[in-house]
Image (cartoon, grey):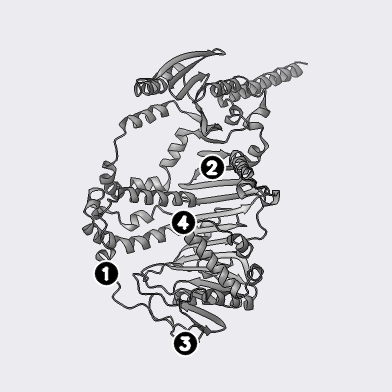
Amino acid sequence: MKRILLLIVIGAVASLAILYGIRMAERSAGPSVSTLLPRETILFGHLPNLNRARDQWHQSDIYQLYLEASVQEFLRKPLAKLPQKDAAARTLKDFAQLDPKDAFVAITKIDDNNPTLVGGFRYRGSAEAAGNLVIGPWLSQVVKTSPTAKRETIHYEHHDIDVITVAPFTLATAFDGEWFFAANDLTELKAIIYRADHRGQDRQSTLDGDKNFHAAMAHMPTAYAISFYLQPKIFADKLAWLRSADGRNVPPDQRTMLEQVRSMCGTTRFEHGKIHDTFFVGMPKLQEGKLSRSSLALGTKDTLIYLATLLNLGQKLDALSQVTGSAAVAAGWQRTLQALARSGVTAEDWKAAFGVELGALADWPATARAPWLFVSFSVQDAARAGQIVEALTRMDEDSIWNQTEKDNVRYFSMTSPASLFAISPTIALSNRIMIVGLDPISVEQAIKRSESDTSELGNSAAYSGAAKSVPAPTNFFAYVDLPLFYSRVDATLRPMLFLGAAFLPWLNDYVDLSKLPPAEVVTKHLSPIVSSQRYDGDGYAAESVGSITLGQSGAALGALAIFGSMGYPRGSSPSLNNLIAPPSSPPPATPSGRKGNASPSPKPSGTP
């Protein structure tokens, strides 16, 4: 009997301990961000743990590159030109002391092009300490910046809401337990506070009760540094309204891509120094087919970029005929379509001639001045494919295309006027593949590789390791050998930069090119970029991994272009001929003869 009583007591104590643990866990976790936001939320970003994300960033490959002594020395001069932001740095440091978690910012609605913004975060410690350390000084600074600012306190359900009004702008803030909330609309802030105090009572009215939100987030990893979610319905509705106002009634099966998108979301996380992006777009499947990556055979040890994607160009020819963009683009498409039509080529001919997968590569041998570029399609009907290629070569009457044949492969090569980089667009057509490039020698070499059963690129350790870090693609795949890319660009541009600095005195005010870090210092912190996309049940999922990811590299190039255009003094551009001498040797010889006449095939002698 005593044993039974002892077991009952132990069981009761264990149950209480478990219940207490659950309650404490719920208390520490607080309400999920999605339970605080209204169901119609358009966009929100989430930062689960600021300090953890900062520590992971400090361990990343890119940050370690930034810490290199030679990189710091090179950046010293340009960073000194930037505005000093000591106050902002101190505020961020003080903010980090609050150990903020679940920080978020969201757009809950847009009325008359005026977005309603809300945000908040959980903090450690008391509200008084948080207010004195960060929030209070920050709000006081907002008031000081505008002499017309009006500040008042409004009481709402045992909460004090601090409202600052600088017409027409309003900022409302409040503490709620371990949470701090802010919004540019008082009514929206009250709604956030109500949901935080009464969470779970009306889940269906919150974002957490939206099925599209849950379906999208199911494709995201459970742990991440930052995430976002976008519900594009408001933009699709606006587009539909504009069409309706113009009297255009579009059938459901002809809706634009935006109207088919149910949701979009993405996350970024750090893994062993690498950055890993995950994106998902909830929408119907656009086309059938599965990526084979057959063009991988064209890659070599000097391949910088390899892309493979499903692109049913034949299916899009009718749509391309309706292009209404710039006059130059529209005219170019119309000329192409007219040339095909004159030769009796239809969209059905293209579908029958070529496969739906496009491959693209950039090879840069160490002895070449510029990369070799290729695009390829698999050939399904050689006769129709030949008809299409011949129609394309006759499109421009001023262009002279020379046709040759070697080993059952037809080569079409166009001679271009002499320029800084002499190019000779070339199309190679066999019974298996069509390859388009900018140089006859490189295209012929690519044709030879396409006949091999092995791939020099595919067998490389760098490619194999990168490809295994993302799921197998069904729609799109990209590989960028970032270390090789940087080393080739450095070897090519470093002497040009030094030469250019002599003609651009203003450049020396921003950067000291003599302290440019050695290429090996940079490349040891870089790894290849890989990206894959697949259709995953109810939408398209994409992942990218690398020292930087594919999306981030694109954003960085865009930012550099903008920065360059802003920093370059107008009117100070010297002639390019004054900076770079034309090539001393003539361009590689190309087959001569009248259009359509056969001549000896190009021989791979010399470097292009």
**Residue 1 appears at what percent x and percent y?**
78, 16
Q: Looking at the image, is mark 1 or mark 2 nearer the viewer?
A: 1
Q: Earlier in the sequence, mark 2 or mark 3?
A: 2
Amino acid type for the residue under numbered disc 4: Pro
Structural distance between the alpha carbons of marks 4 and 3: 40 Å
Q: CA distance from mark 1 to mark 4?
A: 34 Å
* Dot 1 amino acid type: Ala
- Mark 4 vs mark 3: give the one in front: 3
Q: Earlier in the sequence, mark 4 or mark 3?
A: 4
Question: How crowded is the residue under tag 1: few (<14 C-alpha within 10 Å), some, or many (20+)?
Answer: few
Q: Quadrant of the C terminus?
A: bottom left
**x and y, in percent, of residue 537 in the image:** 68, 49
Reply above or below: 332 against 35.
Answer: below
How busy is the neighbourhood of tag 4: few (under 14 within 10 Å), some, or many (20 plus)?
Answer: many
Task: Give the quadrant of residue 492.
Answer: bottom left
Amino acid at circle 2? Thr
Residue 345: image quadrant is bottom right
Determine contact: label 2, label 4, CB under 8 Å.
Answer: no
Q: Earlier in the sequence, mark 1 or mark 3?
A: 1
In the rendered image, which residue does mark 4 sit on? 528
Q: Which residue is mark 3?
A: 600
**At numbered mark 2, what does the secondary structure look like: helix, strand or loop?**
strand
Q: Position of residue 210 (x, y in %)?
A: 66, 34
Q: Neighbour class for label 3 at 10 Å: few (<14), some, many (≥20)?
A: few
Mark 2: give few (<14), some (14-19) or many (20+) Cα within 10 Å: many
Residue 20, relative to residue 373: is it above or below?
above
Q: Residue at x 39, y 30 (%)?
A: 92
Q: Residue at x 43, y 85 (%)?
A: 592
Q: Secondary structure at mark 1?
A: loop
C-alpha distance separating marks 2 and 3: 55 Å
- Label 1 sits on residue: 581
Q: Secondary structure at mark 3?
A: loop
